[in-house]
Image (cartoon, grey):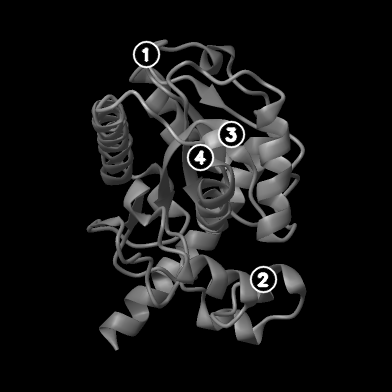
């Protein structure tokens, strides 16, 4: 009974938190000008919010990463991210392709559905967009069984047997470039956010929305971004060494 009451409390407070973020986003919708600045040696962070969310849900994380020297990219035109995952990925890719990439590349930081969009982008556009990895918070990589009980295609797209969920789940080629961060009880992702082959980080916090501004999450995301930057840099060095053996390359 105590666990049930705890979970109901988390669920209620999660919606209160989401409502407050929506309200604040109306009053402070503009992107801080300092987001465009950062250390030229660090990749640009591309923010992808979850369904029914705007970029402001990720604002605490963006501010923390920007303070650490990472430039932040906010892509407008997604609305409340209700379009299908693949369509959203393709729209984002087109928008990013119109802007020259930071010499250090790009790295995606996403919440919930945004992590699925981010994984599709890694699978389909990594080379073209110079994507170095994905940090996903509370992403339903295996879908959510609750999606079966809702109306409308926006949320039913998270049914575990949906073709996009199955397709992304079966493609493990980019999982090593993903860090999945999640808490204990997530009222929207009941089966968890563990992704086989990725770096999985479980935090001692609960919730789906409130987790986004917890100190533990800000620390974990910053550590994850730094980890992916180091890992991709090491891979690039190894690749260069391997390619220097004969001086011959096959396109």
Query: Foreground mark, 4 or 3?
Result: 3
How packed mark 2 is, by other alpha carbons closer than 10 Å (few <14, some 14-19, many 20 or more), is some
Nearer mark to the viewer, of 2 and 3: 3
Residue 129 position in % (x across, y down): 57, 32
* Residue, disc 4: 58
Residue 153 to residue 232: above or below? below
> What is the secondary structure assignment of the residue under circle 1?
loop
Q: Earlier in the sequence, mark 4 or mark 1?
A: 1
Give the residue number, with chain letter if any, for mark 2: 155
Mark 4 and mark 1: Cα distance apart in space: 23 Å
Tag on residue 41?
Answer: 1
Image quadrant assignment for residue 231: top left
2 or 1: mark nearer the eye: 1
Label whose residue precedes the other's in the sequence (4 or 3): 4
Callout 3 environment at 10 Å: few (<14), some (14 to 19), or many (20+)? few
- Please indicate whether residue 49 sits to the left or right of residue 7 in the image: right
- Quarter-wise, where is residue 41 in the image? top left
Q: Which mark is residue 142?
A: none
| Alpha-carbon span between mark 4 and mark 3 | 25 Å
Q: Secondary structure at mark 3?
A: helix
Q: Find the distance from the CA under tag 1 to the CA under tag 3.
A: 19 Å
Considering only order in the chain, which callout, 2 or 4, is on the residue closer to the N terminus?
A: 4
Disc 1, disc 3: CB below 8 Å? no
- N-terminal-most mark, 2 or 3: 3
Q: With respect to residue 44, does 172 lie above or below?
A: below
Q: Which mark is residue 128?
A: 3
Q: Position of residue 62 (x, y in %)?
A: 46, 30
Tell me the distance, in whole angstroms, between the alpha carbons under discs 2 and 3: 30 Å
Residue contact between numbered discs 4 and 1, judged by CB atoms under 8 Å: no
């Amino acid at each position: 009974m105590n666990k049930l009451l705890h979970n109901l409390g988390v669920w209620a407070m999660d919606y209160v938190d989401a409502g407050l973020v929506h309200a604040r986003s109306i009053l402070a919708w503009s992107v801080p000008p300092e987001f465009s600045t950062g250390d030229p040696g660090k990749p640009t962070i591309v923010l992808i919010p979850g369904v029914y969310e705007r970029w402001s849900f990720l604002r605490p994380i963006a501010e923390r990463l920007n303070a650490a020297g990472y430039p932040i990219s906010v892509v407008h035109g997604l609305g409340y991210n209700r379009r299908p995952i693949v369509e959203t990925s393709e729209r984002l890719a087109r928008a990013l392709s119109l802007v020259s990439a930071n010499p250090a590349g790009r790295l995606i930081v996403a919440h919930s559905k945004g992590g699925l969009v981010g994984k599709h982008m890694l699978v389909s556009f990594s080379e073209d967009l110079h994507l170095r990895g994905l940090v996903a918070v509370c992403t339903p990589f295996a879908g959510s069984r609750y999606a079966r009980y809702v109306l409308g295609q926006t949320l039913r797209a998270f049914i575990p047997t949906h073709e996009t969920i199955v397709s992304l789940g079966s493609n493990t080629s980019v999982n090593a470039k993903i860090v999945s961060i999640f808490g204990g009880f997530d009222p929207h992702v009941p089966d968890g956010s563990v992704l086989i082959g990725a770096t999985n980080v479980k935090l001692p916090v609960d919730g789906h929305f409130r987790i986004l501004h917890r100190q533990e999450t800000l620390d974990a995301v910053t550590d994850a971004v730094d980890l992916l930057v180091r890992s991709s840099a090491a891979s690039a060095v190894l690749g260069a060494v391997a390619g220097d053996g004969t001086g011959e390359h096959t396109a």
